[in-house]
Image (tube, rainbow, N blue to C red):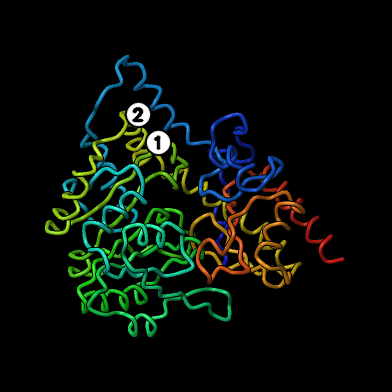
Amino acid sequence: MKPQSNILIYTNYDFSTSSPREDTNAEKYVLRQKLFGTENVEPLWVADMDIDTPDFVLSAVKKRLEHPIIGYEEVPRSAFEAQAAWIKKEHGVKFEVEDLLYSHSVVASMNVAIEAFTDKGDKIIVQTPVYAPFFYSVAEHEREVLKNPLKLRDDGSYTFDIDDLKSKIDERTKLLLLSSPHNPVGRVWRRDELEEILALCIEHNIVVFSDEIHCDLVYKPNVHVPFVSLSKEARDITVTAMGVGKTFNMAGFAISSVAIPNKELRDKFLKVYNRIHFAHGSSLSHVAFEAAYKEGKLWLEELKIHLAKNYSMLEELCERYPIKITPIEATYLAWLDCRGLGLRDKELRNFFVKEAGLGLSNGISFGREGRGFMRLNFALSYAKMSKIITNLEKALQKNRK
């Protein structure tokens, strides 16, 4: 479904330009030579935005810096209260502050869950194509990946393959890693789809680690359904990872959270969590986190309008060439079906890098089901997005001749 971009005209925040990052240590720029063999590419791979972090977040950090001591600090209760209030208002789920734990990243939280809820040799469900750490983390912990590929429908969208999952689950299947909303295919899972997954997990005593880091980047009329909200049974088997990193372009603050309402699950998680010694992170991250949840609503609504316009620019370009853009319901990551270009995966990568000057994520990195696809991050200023469209169109015109 095409995201709506004409709900209102934003007037409070300006996304037409953004601050340059080439002379910073921004990962997406620093690694260009290593990943693409050249510095002369616009990096559109890693999932952070080339859009300025909100001013109210930066102001909170500046205020904290007025105190001259930056030492060990606990995450203040007020920060988790702000997050819990946001989740209740935006997603209809009530978490107690005691349910919430600090984490520096969703991937770190996922690795703790793998250790906490499975043993070596157990099977963990991964639904490809999906963010690569989902299957890498399983293998690194000497667990077995139970691959349950998503079904690609005729309209280019994806859904769960429940029959395939039913046929593969056995007594060694202990954990499901859920991407919701899904990275990279951009789906917002409907309640009925999630309920089918839930029924299987309850039947087979499977814990669900639900990565919901993109849950606030959902385009109307779609509505995010937290897995934990499905039922009391869902609440008892779900570990939810959420945070501000993607939503407010705050990945550099290295702060997210894990919500675990069930005490038995939380105690198992904490046993591994405490052994690793996550501690409480940075005092600057705490105030940034709290400010984002307290003051970020208007900024986010206007950001989503801007992102929808960027997506529409890309969609209109793809309509003129043999690239199919997967219908997007959430995230700022476009999943491009480039099989119509008739290029192998290495050739496809070279086309984007050498012909278009664009550094995208290769579809194959999300699993075999990503062959012939590319992931493009369109969380850019209008000026930069316009440049991307121009570069890609020139390359596609040249390729067509």
Amino acid at pointer 1: Phe
Labels in figure, total: 2
Does residue 361 appear left or right of residue 314 in this picture? left
Which residue corresponds to the image point at 60% horizontal and 39% vertical from the top-left? 29
Image vertical order of residue 113 relative to residue 368, above or below:
above
Q: Position of residue 393 (x, y in %)?
A: 77, 57
Which residue corresponds to the image point at 57% horizontal and 66% vertical from the top-left? 2
Q: Position of residue 257 (x, y in %)?
A: 29, 47
Residue extending furthest toward the right: 401
Q: Nearer the viewer, residue 328 or 400?
A: 400
Q: Position of residue 211 (x, y in %)?
A: 36, 58
* Residue matched to label 1: 253
Image vertical order of residue 51 relative to residue 179, above or below:
above
Does residue 234 appear left or right of residue 226 in this picture? left
- The reply to whether dot 2 and dot 1 touch (C-beta < 8 Å) is yes
Amino acid at pointer 2: Leu
Q: Secondary structure at mark 2?
A: helix
Q: Secondary structure at mark 1?
A: helix
Give the quadrant of residue 22: top right
Screen quadrant of the C terminus: bottom right
Which residue corresponds to the image point at 24% horizontal and 43% vertical from the top-left? 276
Screen quadrant of the N terminus: bottom right
Q: Nearer the viewer, residue 205 or 246?
A: 205
Q: Position of residue 61 (x, y in %)?
A: 39, 26
Cα distance, mark 2 to mark 1?
8 Å
Residue extending furthest toward the top: 68
Q: Which mark is residue 284?
A: 2
Which residue corresponds to the image point at 39% horizontal and 44% vertical from the top-left? 244
Mark before the other along the chain sequence, 2 or 1: 1
Decide: few, some or many residues near mark 1? Use Cα within 10 Å; few <14, some 14-19, many ≥20.
some
